Image (cartoon, rainbow, N blue to C red):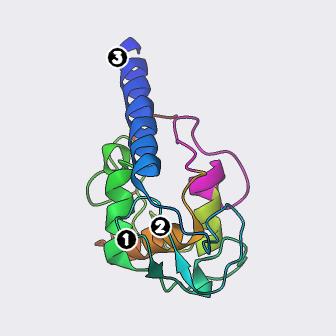
Amino acid sequence: MRTLHNFVTICVFGTALAALATACGSTDDTNSGGSAGSSSSAGTSSAAGTSSAAGTSSAAGTSSAAGSSSTSGDATKGAAVWTAQACAGCHGENAAGQYAPNITFSKTAGIGNWTLAQFTAAVRSGKDIDGTDLCPAMTKFSAINDASMADLYAYLQSKPVSDKAEQGNLCP
C-alpha cells in the first residue's frame, strides 16, 4: 500500500510539474477565450499544452455546450496536450487503461457515450457523467482551455477503441 501511495504521489507531482511547465512555456493571446467555462466561438486561441500560440478554434470546443457530442478539435494538437499533461502515465499510451480506467471511445468499456461537455467536466473538475466524483487520484486539469479540451477529445477519438473494461488499480 505504501508503494501505491508513493506512486500516486509521484504521478500527481509529475503531472503538476508538466502542467506548470506547459503554462510557463505557452504564450498568451489577448483574444483568447481560454478560461474555464468560456464560450468563445471563433478566432484565435492559445492552447495550453500545444506549441501553437495562434491556431484557430471553433465553437464546438466550448465546455458550456451541454449535450454536444461532436467536436471540431484537432487530434494532432490533442496529442500534444495528452503528452504535456502526462495522461499516458495513468491511462496508458493507447488510453485503454493502465493504472487508471479505459478512456478509449468504447461505448461499453470506455467513454464512447460521453459528450465533450461531460469529458470536460471529468478532466477539469473530476466529475463522472452522472456528477459523482471520480477517483481522488484523478488530477483536476482546470487550466486546459476550451480549444485544447476539444483537441484532447478529438485525439482520444482517434485512438483505437478497446472494449476491455479496465478500471486500473489507483482507486477501488
* Residue named by callout 2: 47
Q: Which residues are magenta?
A: 122-141
At 56% from the left edge and 86% from the top edge, which residue is drawn?
58
Residue 126 part of the magenta segment: yes
Whether tag 1 and tag 3 are in contact, CB under 8 A, the answer is: no
Where residue 52 is drawn, which disc sits there? 1
Q: Amino acid at mark 3?
A: Thr
Where residue 138 is drawn, which disc sits there? none
State which tag comes first along the sequence, 2 or 3: 3
Q: Quadrant of the N terminus?
A: top left
Q: Nearer the viewer, mark 1 or mark 3?
A: 1
Whether tag 2 and tag 1 are in contact, CB under 8 A, the answer is: yes
At 57% from the left edge and 85% from the top edge, which residue is drawn?
43
x, y percent for residue 122: 60, 56
Main SS, magenta region, reads loop
Q: Is residue 5 above or below residue 87?
A: above
Q: Nearer the viewer, residue 130 or 43?
A: 43
State which tag comes first along the sequence, 2 or 1: 2
Where residue 3 is drawn, which disc sits there? 3
Task: Tell me how far mark 1 sits from mark 3, CA to CA.
Answer: 38 Å
Q: Is residue 5 above or below residue 97?
A: above
State which tag comes first along the sequence, 1 or 3: 3
Task: Tell me how far mark 2 sits from mark 3, CA to CA.
Answer: 35 Å
Which quadrant would residue 63 be assigned to in this image? bottom right
* Local secondary structure at mark 3: helix
x, y percent for residue 126: 62, 48
Residue 17 part of the magenta segment: no
Q: Nearer the viewer, mark 2 or mark 3?
A: 2
